[in-house]
Image: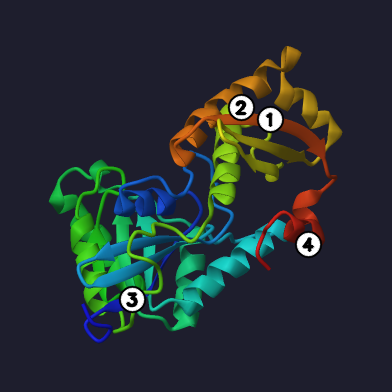
């Protein structure tokens, strides 16, 4: 394949929080690149998933969900990242949920119109639809809201109609040499992915208690002949949150560590020793300097 024959470009996946963006990316790639929980704002960073499709390398950008009200510094950073990803994309993939349209969806559409980028629409979770007839009104409503180049009803969970969208994107990205090696699947290194695995387990375990007051920082990463040793700090907003996280006799934190370690072993394909520490940085999520030190993009 010559450079002139090849295509490559960015497809930014955008939508309101918790609409299925990360699930869609993982389904496209056939592996877990972005963490997924039932909680909004699970995705906090821009994550590129690299998909080789025929003569095209599609760079899917999983973005934080655009929020109507960004009160904290971290909310504003995530919103800026989502908007910038949209503005920089060759094609925008707007995703909404079948049978559920909210103010936050309108907010994303307004931002999409401002960007002026070509866009395709995805109506996700069509497995909830009672047959094809039920889809027709939803397709018309989405078409009325924006001048999409194409609209795909889809189920990110089971992959319905996924191939058609990937084919379309592959045909409409610009001629360009590939930007990543042929075997690449993401732009993120293992340290980042390990921190995200730990955060996913924290969010799943803590549920309603602390999911948004948490950040994870990898402190040490020491490969050895027999195992990889990792020490990670879990940053909390308030000292009073520590007992909730740690649990009686440390059992809760130990459970989280055990669950995370299983996924980390699969990622690095080797033995892992994992240590987790709970520390406090007051209002870390509203401090731009601390956010930068924790790896949040400006």
Q: Quick one: which residue is furthest to the top in this view?
A: 249
**Label 3: which residue?**
8
Of residues 263 and 250, the one nearer the viewer is 263
Residue 189 pos. (x, y %): 53, 54
Query: Can you say whether 129 is above or below 279 in the image?
Result: below
* Nearer mark to the viewer, of 2 and 4: 2
Quadrant where the N terminus lies? bottom left
Query: Can you say whether 56 is above or below 52 in the image?
Result: below
At mark 4, the secondary structure is helix
Residue 47 pos. (x, y %): 50, 59
Neighbourhood count class around disc 4 (C-alpha, 10 Å): few under 14, some 14–19, many 20 upward? some
Of residues 225 and 83, the one nearer the viewer is 225
* Nearer mark to the viewer, of 4 and 1: 1
Q: Are marks 1 and 2 in contact (CB under 8 Å)?
A: yes
Give the spatial CA distance, label 4 vs label 3: 34 Å
Q: Earlier in the sequence, mark 4 or mark 3?
A: 3
């Amino acid at each position: 394949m010559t450079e002139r024959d090849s295509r490559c470009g960015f497809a930014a996946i955008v939508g309101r929080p918790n609409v299925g963006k990360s699930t869609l990316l993982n389904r496209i790639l056939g592996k877990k690149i972005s963490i997924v929980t039932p909680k909004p704002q699970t995705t906090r960073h821009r994550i590129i998933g690299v998909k080789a499709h025929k003569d095209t390398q599609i760079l899917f950008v999983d973005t934080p969900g655009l929020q109507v009200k960004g009160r904290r510094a971290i909310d504003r950073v995530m919103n800026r990242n989502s908007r910038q990803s949209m503005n920089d994309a060759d094609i925008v993939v707007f995703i909404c949920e079948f049978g559920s349209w909210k103010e936050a969806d309108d907010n994303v559409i307004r931002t999409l119109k401002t960007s002026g980028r070509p866009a395709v629409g995805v109506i996700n979770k069509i497995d909830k639809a009672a047959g094809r007839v039920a889809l027709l009104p939803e397709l018309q409503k989405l078409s009325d809201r924006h001048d999409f180049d194409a609209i795909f009803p889809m189920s990110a969970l089971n992959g319905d109609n996924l191939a058609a969208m990937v084919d379309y994107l592959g045909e409409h990205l610009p001629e360009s040499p590939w930007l990543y090696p042929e075997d690449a699947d993401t732009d993120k290194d293992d340290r980042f992915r390990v921190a995200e695995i730990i955060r996913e387990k924290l969010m799943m375990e803590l549920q309603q208690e602390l999911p948004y007051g948490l950040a994870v920082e990898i402190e040490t990463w020491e490969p050895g002949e027999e195992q990889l040793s990792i020490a990670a700090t879990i940053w909390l907003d308030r000292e009073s949150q520590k007992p909730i996280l740690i649990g009686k006799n440390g059992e809760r934190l130990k459970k989280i560590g055990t669950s995370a370690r299983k996924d980390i072993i699969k990622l690095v394909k080797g033995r892992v020793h994992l240590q987790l520490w709970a520390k406090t940085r007051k209002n870390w999520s509203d401090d731009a300097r601390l956010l930068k030190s924790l790896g949040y993009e400006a």
